[in-house]
Amino acid sequence: MSTLRFPELGFYTLAGAPKSPRDMLEELVHAEQLGLGAAFISERFNIKEAGALTGAAVAVTNSINIVTAATNHTTRHPLVSASWASTLHILSEGRFSLGLGRGIEAMFNAYGMPLATTESLEAFALLMRRLWNGETVFNYSDLTGTYPVLRLDPDFALNIPLSITAFGPRTLEMAGRAYDNVILHTFFTDETTARAVQTVKRSAEQSGRDPSTVKVWSCFATVGDHIAADLRLKKTVGRLATYLQAYGDLMVRTNKWDPAVLQRFRNDEFVKGFGGAIDAKGTTQDLERIATLIPPEWLAAAATGSAQQCVAAIENQFALGCDGVIMHGATPTELEPIVTAYAAN
């Protein structure tokens, strides 16, 4: 019997910097017990390789959807990506979605891997759909190389949903044309979220698609007061500070924040000298210091407070036009009081 009660709610498994990928197994069991609709899996080049994790995830679950959010299409041969998805689609009886993202430029440059472009992400989506529908594709070229022949199985007619993490307007427009699920970024303001939803839906309609079939997911930091204060600080201040370290200009530009605040953050001697990601390495004392550099309104785009207050914030994401909410940065155990309150509503 399916335990899926809230298809519109999701979470990220192995949030933050887990010590073992085995933690995912218990999280997924608990998430299904809560009735959550989707488990999102991010990829890191350490103990979070997406192929291994998604295989384990579909094997230990029965109802929850499993989505990569995200892997990068430039890190694997196209046939490897296509057959990974077709294998898990059949193994999970339709619960798997291949989710892609652009990647972080500095990291990909350092590793010598091509960074995806908006055009390459759209072309790759089209290629996957052709292969999953039994086509043989000749002389395909992309950022990773040229492939004389690409084919999976000529008898395939697989409807595998494609997901994408999206930030800027061009990527959002492309996502409306080519993808099935669009995952927004954490700490988007209400105005940014509403604008992103409108961009995706309008693009879907202009390309001849039914906008209701393209689902936009808010990735919404959900950190209730029942979580210990030091951990709340890591999940809010620490996480946003890490985003500002990695791609602060994009965050500021997208949310129309004051770039002078970002510059003050970057110029701070403690921040400049900090080694590593702030949310992973920062102590409570470090985070309390960094909190003074981040305006409260930048952190306001989150579900915080009591369980009922968190539910109200989540419901506001639906009011802004989102089809789903990923309760980001929390385990199913941490989310249980909030999901209970959501169910009561």
Image (cartoon, rainbow, N blue to C red):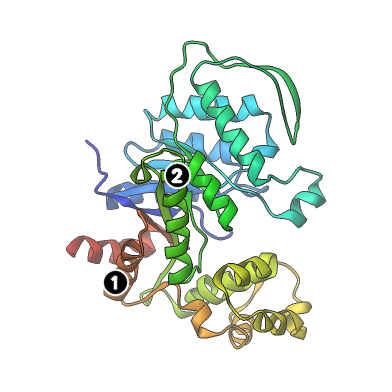
Q: Which badge, 2 or 1, comes first in the chain's sequence?
A: 2
Which amino acid lies under the numbered mark 2 shown in the image of this protein?
A: Gln
Up-down: is 274 above or below 276?
below
The residue lying at 27 percent from left, 44 percent from top is 4
Q: Residue furthest front?
A: 206
Residue 206 appears left or right of 104: left
Give x and y (percent) for residue 285. Answer: 61, 84
Label 2: which secondary element:
helix
Instruction: Specify the quadrant that holds the N terminus.
Output: top left
Label 2 packing within 10 angstroms: few (<14), some (14-19), many (20+): few
**Label 2 vs label 1: CA separation?**
33 Å
Is 305 on the left or on the right of 77, as rendered? left
From the top left corner, tell me how far across and down residue 34 is, in percent: 28, 53
- Residue under the image location 51 percent in, 74 percent down: 236
Q: Secondary structure at mark 1?
A: helix
**From what the image shows, is residue 38 above or below residue 96?**
below
Local packing at callout 1 (Cα closer than 10 Å; few below 14, some 14-19, many 20+) is some
| Residue lying at 34% horizontally and 71% vertically, measured from the top left | 313
- Residue 278 in view (yes/no): no
Residue lying furthest top: 154
Q: Which mark is residue 169?
A: none
Q: Is residue 275 left or right of residue 180?
A: right
Residue type, mark 1 in image: Ala
Numbered tag placed on residue 312 in the rendering: 1
Q: Which residue is mark 2?
A: 206
Is residue 81 shown left or right of residue 97? right
User: Nearest the camera: 233 or 249?
Assistant: 249
Q: Position of residue 42 (x, y in %)?
A: 55, 49
